[in-house]
Amino acid sequence: MTVLVAPKVLSDHRVRDFKMLIDGKWEAGTSHSIERVAPSHGVLVSRYPAGTKADAERAIAAARKAFDNGAWPRMTASERANVLLKAADLIAARAEELAYLDAIEAGKPISQVRGEIAGSVDIWRYAASLARNLHGESYNTLGDGTLGVVLREAIGVVSIITPWNFPFLIVGQKLPFALAAGCTTVVKPSELTSGSTLVLGEILQEAGVPNGVVNIVTGTGAEVGAIMTSHPHVDMVSFTGSTGVGKLTMTNAAQTLKKVSLELGGKNPQIVFPDADLDAFIDAAVFGAYFNAGECCNAGSRLILHKDIASDVVRRVAELAKHVKVGDPLDPTTQVGAIITPQHLEKIGGYLAGARDSGARIAHGGETLDFGMGQFMAPTILEAVTPGMAVAREEVFGPVLSVLTFETTAEAIEIANSIDYGLSAGVWSRDFDTCLTIGRKVRAGTVWMNTFMDGTPELPFGGYKQSGLGRELGRHAVEDYTETKTLNMHVGGRTNWWMPQK
Ligand code: NAD
């Protein structure tokens, strides 16, 4: 049983036609349009230009010109910070429009997206604060003859490539920091959810970002993304998406030795000990697994439960999962929205079939939900999962929770670390030693203790192992978009290397 919120037919619905932004001009594109059908309502909601390789090349040329000759990298940090602060205000002013676009294009619950837009406003403001704190170092300790100054310089042209699961939030984890450093950019949103990023383009123009500093090219990864990651005039690639495409990105970028920052997949464990506050954990388990329909890099998709509490926990998680509201993303009470595409729903179904064939049991859910429109799936729990199964190792990217068990702390750590991913993890215990042991031994970029999936711009975020390379957010986020330059200055007479022969 699942609490269903049937999507209402979109009565005053209009298809929104978008253009892409190249060198300050809005362009319809020369190729066909990409049509986005709402995953919740099954109707066409947006059209974006299918950008071509030539469009991407023009965008890169515009960003290059704006970096090499334009005002943005040369203005004061205070001026750039003011533009970012104005952008934050304008995002807040258009929050409802942005939330609607992400909800209808990605199938995400509107209440959740409102929170994401508010979170983005905070991140844009945080980036503005870092802009004015970016500085290098000086060394006056190298003797009378030497003064050393270490400069931080904007790295140059940055390609920013984003996925569909948090369309507005993720571009906000990259773009304001790149802009704060003085970089210029070419942005490619996912071809499934480009709307809110294109509205951001309008906002940035209004906030005073000069032409060519932010270019937004819509289109596919194969056409637009491939050139953005390989073009010699791009200095850095900041990519969020699947581990497979992340590897391709790194390979492409390696041909010209670009810097790459990669935020990739996860298969994140929540490790639970018998002394944990189970009331708090049960809610966090359901939240961790079903938030964003499990289409979340940070999803707590693996429960690693102490065997003494496993059956009780599974029963209680299943009981709470029954009360989660699934359906219309535009209904403010909905907690789990639609699955991004019919193909993705099929892929999730394939994982469930494979798990059952390998001996796992469905403790709850497992079925698709038919509202006569869109594609939805019930919150699902799989028990009797063993560490070797695909559902224990691979990113299902759907509302599917896999339950494994352990007996000793060492075994829990071994299971947690036994896969290729290392994005985040959670540990639940009232014992300080237990929490710290797990926190230090689990190889993941974030470890939550007695909570799950909390975040704030001050705390760095990113993955170990095949979950990524580099960190976003945190006080070094702007530095990531810089090069380091050493000025080694000689003072007074210099001792010659070449001495006249005697
Ligand atoms: P994806 O890898 O399919 O696509 C991501 C982006 O890359 C899209 O814009 C796509 O068009 C582009 N792309 C595709 N092929 C490309 C190519 N050859 N060259 C350059 N760009 C290309 O990922 P997705 O399905 O959009 O998103 C889901 C994935 O993103 C999941 O694996 C999820 O874990 C990951 N993700 C990670 C984080 C994180 O911060 N670690 C956050 C959100 C999502």
Image (cartoon, rainbow, N blue to C red):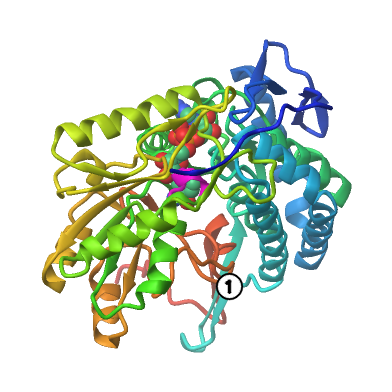
Specify whether residue 296 is painted magenta.
yes
Give the residue at x 66% y 57%. 115
Depicted 155 relative to depicted 457: above or below: above
Quarter residue 500 falls in: bottom left
Q: Residue 57 placed where, x, y %? A: 63, 25
Give the residue at x 12% y 66%. 411
Identify residue type, mark 1.
Gly
Q: Quadrant of the C terminus?
A: bottom left
Q: Quadrant of the N terminus?
A: top left
- Give whichever of 176, 5 is nearer the camera: 5
Q: Is residue 476 left or right of residue 211?
A: left
Give the residue at x 59% y 19%. 53
Q: Residue 378 placed where, x, y %? A: 44, 40
Q: Residue 248 placed where, x, y %? A: 38, 32
Specify whether residue 18 is painted magenta.
no
Which residue corresponds to mark 1? 136
Give the residues in magenta: 292-297
Instruction: Please indicate, yes or no, whether residue 136 appears anywhere in the rendered image.
Output: yes
Instruction: Please indicate, yes or no, whether residue 423 appears anywhere in the rendered image.
Output: no
